[in-house]
């Protein structure tokens, strides 16, 4: 028998790293168990963080006090703010990462936390007594005792890898699968399923002809993820874009009879929004080409990630098809793409805290819950780590509402709707996305992170200073007046209507043709504007709040109306059989999913508005 811990985290991927770091930072003694100490925080798929909606999640993790944003800033080789041509609710930060630096920075961060111990082994059993977790048992027969356990097993639970007709056990290339744990959890009463994901071949960048591709540069003024003082990116590596063609498609089709996906050897469903190249050709037969993103894996490597060419076809088919892509005529392949099928546990078996309903103080986070993506895994790990710590110390649960963050949207979607295919976050999933922007994650969440002991005093002070700066600048803009002689010549260059008399600076900024980057110059032109020393973030935030004031107020009102339902708690032991008027399906779903609030109950598929009304009547509302 070895040492006992407050929290044990199983798995050291993106979810496991955030879970271990969060619990340890808040004061728990943590044991992080991983199959391989050399693959902590491995970027198993593409070497990138962020993207549409995913970038918002990374900023929220950072705002709460997590580390994914800081690690991303330290390891990025290119930064782009996506969707700049659209409204600010759609702006999404994304970075290309150095795969090795990312993993190394995570390991350094974890090793620098003295509350974290490490153990290299495979967990094949959780220890449970009287419906409560007591620890884990490893393949070496070693038992560790804990108050809380977080499972972040990724794609390793009974993982099978497929390349053409070849099938072998594993959760990632050159790494074995984890067995035994699924069967034990099923024995405890959990439901399980199978999912599939995949990865493309890696190639030698020296063998590519970039003259035949479109260069994709990073932003001229690269941003970052973290609200802390992480280093600014001073140089960047380019990515490239090329396309498949009919010759590529014809070559790929020669291997369809050996495709594990088409022959039925893979049973699990793959990610809808990141399909394999053979799936794209099959599903979108009318398309004569598909985009291929050529992404470098780091500063000091020639290895290239062929994004958009995920496949499990035979390696010879992969190679021959690659050589027909413009720029890939002389390609040398480092290793083929493959598919991996693995066990997951439908997330409707979880509470809002990501604690399981069946076993007290047992938490699931990441791909074990049916999600896909580093960012989705990281935020689940963070929330599971926070609540594993708080459960261990018998403190109140910590949750985020749908109106407070994309993290809240993701978790609420998972536990109320479940998922039959790998869940990926999009801005369209958030009904309050104008409120949940990437620029204001710190204003929304840092105070919450600080209150629970995760976000540091420095983070909190930085956020409050930013909030004060926004308030001061907004007040000055509201009171300042603009004279025609000060501004008309500039307005003429923008094609904007000229002023005829002294006007409000606040009203002027609402004009659509006046953009955020114009405001810094405008502040200098207006004589009535007091000198205020504020940074780019404060100006950007202030302009957004002014320009979209009406939309923001409407969303806040809608969120406030629905929040009254979110604040109506339902006792977890509530006897739904007592309510005879509930529909049969509604009663069945409510008994199985055990929503914690009326708001959650209303979002469960199969629970009708009349079922919700009956619950409200019973509760006296």
Image (cartoon, rainbow, N blue to C red):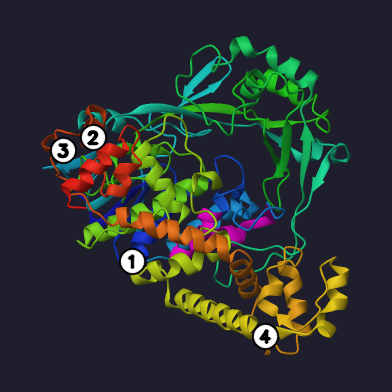
Q: Earlier in the sequence, mark 4 or mark 2?
A: 4
Q: Which structural element holds mark 3?
A: helix
Q: Residue at coordinates 53% horizontally, 33% vertically from top-left?
A: 173
Q: Position of residue 392 (x, y in %)?
A: 22, 58
Marks 4 and 3, how far apart at CA? 59 Å
Q: Give the mark toward the camera: 2 or 1.
A: 2
Q: Which mark is residue 480?
A: 4
Name the residue: 68% across, 89% down. Answer: 531
Q: Earlier in the sequence, mark 3 or mark 2?
A: 3
Q: Nearer the viewer, residue 6 or 374?
A: 374
Q: Which residues are magenta?
A: 56-82
User: Residue 171 placed where, x, y %?
Assistant: 46, 32
The answer to whether 502 appears left or right of 341 in the picture is right
Circle 3 is placed at which residue position? 576
Residue 56 image offset from top left, x and y in percent: 54, 55
The answer for how far apart the CA atoms under marks 4 and 2 are is 58 Å
């Amino acid at each position: 028998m070895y040492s006992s811990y407050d929290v044990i985290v199983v798995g050291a991927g993106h979810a496991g790293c955030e879970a271990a770091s969060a619990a340890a930072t808040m004061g728990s003694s943590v044991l992080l168990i991983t199959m391989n100490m050399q693959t902590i925080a491995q970027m198993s798929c593409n070497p990138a963080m962020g993207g549409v909606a995913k970038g918002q999640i990374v900023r929220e993790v950072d705002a709460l006090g997590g580390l994914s944003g800081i690690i991303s800033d330290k390891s990025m080789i290119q930064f782009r703010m996506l969707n700049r041509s659209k409204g600010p609710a759609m702006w999404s930060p994304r970075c290309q990462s150095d795969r090795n630096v990312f993993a190394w920075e995570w390991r350094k961060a974890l090793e620098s936390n003295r509350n974290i111990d490490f153990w290299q082994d495979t967990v094949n059993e959780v220890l449970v007594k009287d419906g409560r977790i007591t620890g884990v048992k490893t393949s070496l027969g070693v038992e560790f005792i804990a108050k809380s356990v977080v499972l972040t097993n990724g794609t390793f639970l009974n993982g099978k890898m497929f390349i053409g007709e070849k099938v072998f056990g594993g959760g990632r290339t050159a790494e074995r699968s984890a067995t035994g744990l699924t069967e034990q959890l099923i024995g405890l009463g959990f439901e399980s399923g199978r999912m599939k994901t995949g990865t493309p071949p890696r190639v030698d960048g020296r063998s590519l002809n970039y003259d035949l591709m479109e260069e994709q540069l990073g932003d001229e003024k690269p941003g970052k993820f973290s609200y802390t003082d992480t280093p600014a990116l001073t140089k960047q590596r380019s990515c490239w874009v090329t396309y498949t063609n009919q010759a590529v498609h014809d070559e790929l089709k020669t291997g369809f009879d050996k495709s594990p996906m088409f022959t039925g050897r893979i049973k699990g469903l793959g990610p809808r929004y990141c399909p394999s190249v053979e799936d794209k050709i099959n599903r979108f037969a009318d398309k004569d080409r598909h985009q291929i993103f050529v992404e470098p894996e780091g500063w000091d490597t020639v290895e290239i990630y062929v994004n958009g060419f995920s496949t499990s076809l035979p390696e010879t088919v992969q190679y021959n098809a690659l050589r027909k892509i413009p720029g890939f005529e002389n390609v040398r392949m480092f290793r083929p793409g493959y598919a991996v099928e693995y066990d997951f546990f439908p997330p409707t078996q979880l509470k809002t805290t990501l604690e399981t309903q069946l076993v007290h103080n047992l938490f699931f986070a990441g791909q074990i819950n049916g999600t896909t993506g580093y960012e989705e895994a990281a935020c689940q790990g963070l929330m599971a780590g926070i609540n594993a710590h708080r459960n261990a110390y018998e403190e109140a649960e910590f949750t985020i509402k749908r109106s407070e963050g994309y993290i809240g949207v993701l978790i609420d979607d998972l536990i109320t709707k479940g998922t039959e295919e790998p869940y990926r976050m999009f801005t369209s999933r958030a009904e309050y996305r104008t409120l949940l922007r990437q620029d204001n994650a710190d204003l929304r969440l840092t105070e919450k992170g600080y209150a629970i002991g995760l976000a540091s005093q420095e983070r909190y002070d930085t956020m409050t200073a930013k909030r004060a700066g926004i308030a001061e600048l907004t007040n000055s803009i509201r009171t300042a007046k603009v004279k025609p002689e000060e501004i008309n010549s500039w307005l003429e260059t923008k094609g904007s209507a000229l002023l005829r008399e002294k006007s409000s600076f606040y009203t002027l900024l609402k004009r659509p043709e006046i953009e955020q980057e114009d405001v810094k110059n405008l502040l200098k032109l207006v004589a009535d504007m007091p000198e205020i020393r504020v940074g780019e973030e404060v100006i950007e935030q202030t302009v957004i709040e002014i320009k979209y004031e009406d939309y923001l107020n409407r969303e806040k009102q809608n969120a406030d109306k629905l929040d009254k339902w979110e604040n109506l708690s339902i006792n977890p032991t509530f006897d739904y059989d007592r309510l005879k008027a509930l529909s049969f399906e509604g009663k069945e779903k409510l008994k199985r999913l055990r929503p914690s609030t009326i708001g959650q109950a209303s979002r469960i598929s199969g629970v009708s508005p009349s079922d919700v009304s009956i619950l409200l009547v019973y509760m006296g509302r």
